[in-house]
């Protein structure tokens, strides 16, 4: 679904004699397919679940506060109950004692639901290759976006959220359990940011020295 | 009969409204039943208690700790019922009625004042009251002067 | 070091007194480089000696600071120590006389049992449970010896030397449906195990999980509540949901590569957590750091103290009901993080201190941002005072709630602002100054009521005192090297390693293999953001630690929650939890 905003003083107002009708329609009427609109609605109102395990939760909380403001991206309300939330951010290390709890909470999240794995510990166990830590939350949960960092900066979490939103915008869910098969259609597997940015990184030659502010 | 068709005419807006409301509600329920996906997972039907399975049920004998405010509410609610009854016929009752209702309200206010002073409206727990008594001073830091604020 | 001579002087007579009185119970006496006397006791004489030390000795030890164990089965350098397979260590602290003593009991397999001391010091309860969980040592007479850190279904005792450390050395993790049900059933609260009745004469009680996933418990912490309507009859805190095995990780990492793990123990404290660890190593290795290093360390620690207390302030206000102040405080935290990032390179977990110094010198222009912060903060703190501390509703909700006396605090092992709010003016930075704190001019705020409001007020005043210390650091930063030139400094000064082959070899070996710290034991304690944080390191002369014991303040604080919240309502419990200022990684490590 494509739409755009124009500044009021820059927009050319329709003058009589020119193709005003098409212009008028373009500026006031939006045509789209139902599935696109539903996907747009879903992606721009991802309500996170109030869930945090460890140090990454502090950075997630920082992302929710005024400086970084996750609410701009639609994650306005943090829900206390999993049944009212769309998205769970596994922020922090997944401990063996906590894993059954996380799994229970994930099951209680109502569809449609998405999982962002935040931080190295949730991605793969991180630097904690130790007896009491599960080596990655994807051992028992399906993950949509992995945000790397220890802890990831709030900006990194925002980027992860934007990637998730774009991915949700591209997916199609069945209309009804009565008529379709229960498959979630995703067009292509999502690309890894590392591969996308490799060319830029290799081309960079200036690295700022840490000796000066 | 004539009066029957008259009443039917008078009722027609209500019936139309009622039918429309039922239509909207049934559409919403039917659509939400039919649309979307169906998933059944074992944890979905159990109550949410911070991720742990709860101990005991929700049906048990609750202590009637707040019965005093409940009873007081009943009493003052009935007072309001009488006030409503008087308010509907305020002009007919005239000044005599006003004086009577004022006496009524005054008596109940005296009762309320008594309850307030005797502490029936204070639902604090025993421990809360005890620990409030042990407080010394207004609270806060006692040994640092506000000299640091003068510096800044 | 001045502090060690004080300790030695104070406790020399005590050791004599004990040796005379309990001659047959004391097996050996030792003294390590931190100056704390270590007495080895026989198991039968343990309770006698400990109760004597608690009440009757010339020096009374009010607090059981730490109780832990060491698996000595593969330790090679044990000169002067009696034979032992498992050593249980008791660290007692005297606040009135400002000295410590350490008592050890040697246990031989297969008889790994020892009498409990949870009736002498109430806070021994959880420490003994942790020892049982980690080592398998039975404490006879303990009211409820169950696992505390690990799930109830765990088999084995992790800190034993024969238990695998890495998750990759164990079977790959999977969570199938049946397994989850078993685990959840094991986690479920059973009131009978804790001696709770299900009903009173007139009503039944509700057992509610203020569970691991709850916004008010500040992390993965669970309290099982026994409620009569709204009033709390009893509570059982359940920890271990955040157990990351930091102590076992110490045995797997070298002395140098363990530094990032210390950062994440109190994840709001950042570099402040590196400090006791590197100071302990420096004491064992005999490294003396330059003055500039001390002042840089103090400055960064105080910056992190401000950041941590601001977060506490914001979440405290949020839990009591004010949803706005937390946003303002987080903006201040961003300022502090900007400074820390420009100096250390990372926001939350810099891991910037090194053995023998700090990682790099301060960048040019470092003081500008700090001076701006110092000018800006007092006015903001005044605003927050008006918003939070002077707010009538906050006062009504927090004054008189969760009160405890100094005696109770010492019994339960409470340190830090929680102790100072009861009226005891005791700050480790003043009592036993470390890292140059004796040169700084600051006050130690106290309050007298010991309720939630006072704990918050004390921490707010500590922010002001930290600003004062930072101003003194900025004004008086001494010039000089940012690392010591001692050979065990890891990694050594870069300039030297580029010119000198021995230094280069040293650099390579200490960064890859690890610096070889001479054998010994040391305890180093600091006044961290949450209370007294101490590292007890045992070195066997290797490149890594033999045993790393992290005594964290929040572990003791959480134990006290049922004590101070019985008879209150659930909303008061939330205020109490908010005022304790704990971090789950600090509790479970």
Image: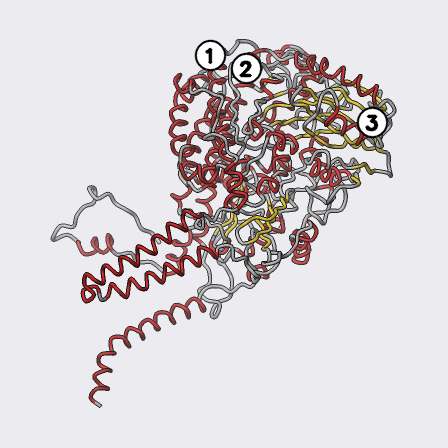
Q: Are marks 2 and 1 in contact (CB under 8 Å)?
A: no
For image coordinates 56% across by 64% down, the residue present is B40
Chain-order first, disc 2 or disc 3: 3
Instruction: Same chain for labels 2 and 1? Say yes or no.
Output: yes
- Crowding around mark 1 (Cα neighbors within 10 Å: few <14, some 14 to 19, many 20+) is few
Q: Nearer the viewer, residue C589 or C533?
A: C533
**Chain containing mark 1:** C
Which one is closest to the eye, mark 3 or mark 1?
3
**Residue denoted by label 1:** C475
* Tag in front: 2 or 3: 3
Q: Position of residue A58 (x, y in %)?
A: 51, 37
Tell me residue B113's x, y (percent).
Answer: 37, 50
Residue C111 as seen in the image, left or right of residue C505:
right
Question: Label 3 lies in what chain?
Answer: C
What residue is pinned by disc 3? C41
Q: Quadrant of residue B78?
A: bottom left
How much space separates mark 2 and mark 1, taking CA atoms? 11 Å
Judging from the image, mark 2 belongs to the subunit labelled C
Q: Earlier in the sequence, mark 3 or mark 1?
A: 3
């Amino acid at each position: 679904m494509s739409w755009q905003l124009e500044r009021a003083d820059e927009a050319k107002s329709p003058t009589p004699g020119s193709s005003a009708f098409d212009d008028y329609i373009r500026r006031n009427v939006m045509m789209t397919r139902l599935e696109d609109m539903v996907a747009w609605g879903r992606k721009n109102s991802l309500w996170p679940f109030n869930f945090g395990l460890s140090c990454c939760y502090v950075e997630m909380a920082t992302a929710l506060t005024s400086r970084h403001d996750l609410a701009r991206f639609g994650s306005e309300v943090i829900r206390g109950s999993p049944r009212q939330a769309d998205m769970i951010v596994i922020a922090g290390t997944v401990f063996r004692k906590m894993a059954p709890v996380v799994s229970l909470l994930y099951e209680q999240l109502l569809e449609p639901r998405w999982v962002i794995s935040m931080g190295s510990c949730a991605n793969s166990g991180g630097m904690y290759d130790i007896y009491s830590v599960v080596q990655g939350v994807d051992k028992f949960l399906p993950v949509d976006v992995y945000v790397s960092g220890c802890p990831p900066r709030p900006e990194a979490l925002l980027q992860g959220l934007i990637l998730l939103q774009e991915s949700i915008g591209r997916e199609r869910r069945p209309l009804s359990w009565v008529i379709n098969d229960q498959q979630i259609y995703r067009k292509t597997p999502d690309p890894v940011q590392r591969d996308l940015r490799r060319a830029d990184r290799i081309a960079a030659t200036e690295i700022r020295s840490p000796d000066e502010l | 009969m004539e009066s029957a068709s008259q009443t039917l005419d008078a009722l027609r807006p209500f019936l139309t409204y009622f039918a429309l409301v039922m239509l909207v509600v049934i559409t919403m329920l039917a659509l939400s039943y039919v649309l979307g996906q169906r998933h059944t997972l074992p944890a979905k039907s159990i109550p949410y208690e911070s991720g742990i399975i709860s101990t005991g049920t929700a049906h048990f004998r609750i202590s009637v700790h707040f019965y005093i405010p409940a009873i007081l509410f009943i009493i003052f609610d009935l007072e309001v019922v009488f006030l409503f009854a008087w308010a509907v016929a305020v002009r007919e009752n005239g000044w005599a009625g006003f004086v009577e209702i004022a006496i009524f309200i005054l008596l109940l206010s005296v009762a309320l004042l008594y309850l307030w002073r005797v502490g029936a409206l204070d639902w604090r727990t025993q421990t809360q009251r005890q620990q409030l008594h042990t407080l010394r001073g207004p609270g806060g830091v006692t040994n640092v002067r506000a000299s640091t604020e003068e510096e800044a | 070091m001045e502090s060690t001579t004080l300790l030695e002087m104070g406790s020399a007579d005590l050791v004599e007194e004990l040796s005379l009185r309990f001659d047959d119970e004391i097996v050996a006496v030792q003294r390590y480089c931190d100056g704390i006397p270590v007495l080895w006791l026989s198991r039968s004489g343990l309770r006698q000696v400990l109760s004597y030390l608690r009440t009757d000795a010339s020096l009374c030890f009010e607090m059981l600071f730490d109780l832990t164990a060491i698996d000595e089965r593969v330790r090679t350098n044990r000169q002067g120590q009696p034979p032992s397979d498992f050593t249980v260590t008791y660290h007692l602290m005297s606040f009135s006389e400002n000295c410590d003593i350490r008592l050890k009991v040697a246990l031989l397999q297969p008889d790994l049992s020892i009498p409990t001391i949870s009736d002498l010091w109430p806070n021994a309860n959880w420490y003994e449970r942790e020892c049982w969980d980690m080592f398998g040592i039975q404490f006879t007479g303990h009211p409820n010896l169950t696992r505390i850190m690990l799930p109830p279904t765990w088999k084995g005792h992790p800190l034993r030397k024969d238990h695998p450390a890495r998750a990759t050395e164990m079977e790959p993790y999977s969570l199938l449906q049946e397994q989850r049900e078993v685990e959840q059933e094991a986690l479920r609260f059973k009131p009978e195990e804790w001696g709770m009745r299900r009903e009173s004469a007139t009503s039944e009680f509700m057992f509610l999980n203020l569970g691991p996933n709850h916004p008010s418990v500040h992390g993965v912490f669970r309290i099982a509540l026994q409620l009569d309507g709204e009033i709390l009859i009893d509570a059982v805190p359940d920890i271990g949901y955040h157990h990351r095995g930091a102590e076992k990780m110490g045995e797997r990492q070298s002395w140098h590569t363990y530094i990032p793990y210390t950062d994440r123990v109190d994840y709001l404290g950042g570099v402040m957590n590196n400090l006791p660890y590197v100071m302990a190593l420096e004491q064992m290795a005999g490294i003396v750091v330059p003055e500039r290093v001390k002042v840089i360390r103090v400055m960064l620690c105080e910056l992190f103290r401000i950041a941590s207390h601001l977060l506490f302030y914001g979440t405290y206000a949020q839990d009591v009901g004010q949803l706005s102040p937390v946003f303002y405080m987080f903006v201040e935290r961003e300022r502090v993080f900007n400074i820390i990032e420009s100096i250390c390179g990372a926001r939350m977990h810099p891991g910037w201190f090194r053995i023998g110094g700090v990682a790099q010198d301060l960048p040019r222009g470092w003081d500008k941002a700090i001076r701006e912060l110092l000018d800006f903060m007092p006015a903001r703190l005044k605003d927050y005072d008006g918003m939070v501390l002077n707010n009538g509703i906050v006062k009504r909700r927090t004054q008189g709630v969760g009160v405890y006396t100094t005696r109770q605090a010492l019994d339960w092992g409470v340190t830090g602002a929680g102790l100072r709010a009861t009226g005891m003016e005791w700050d480790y930075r003043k009592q036993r100054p470390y890292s140059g704190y004796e040169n700084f001019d600051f006050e130690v705020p106290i309050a007298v009521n010991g309720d939630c409001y006072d704990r918050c007020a004390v921490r707010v005043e500590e922010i002001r005192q930290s600003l004062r210390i930072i101003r003194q650091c900025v004004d008086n930063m001494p010039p000089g090297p940012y690392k010591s030139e001692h050979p065990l400094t890891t990694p050594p000064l870069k300039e030297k390693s580029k010119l000198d082959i021995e230094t280069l070899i040293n650099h390579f070996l200490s960064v890859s293999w690890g610096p070889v710290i001479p054998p010994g034991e040391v305890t180093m304690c600091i006044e961290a953001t949450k209370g007294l944080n101490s590292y007890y390191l045992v070195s066997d002369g290797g490149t890594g630690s033999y045993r790393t014991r992290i005594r964290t303040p929040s572990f003791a604080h959480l134990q006290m929650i049922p004590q101070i919240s019985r008879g209150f309502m659930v909303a008061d419990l939330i205020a109490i939890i908010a005022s304790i200022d704990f971090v789950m990684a600090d509790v479970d490590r």
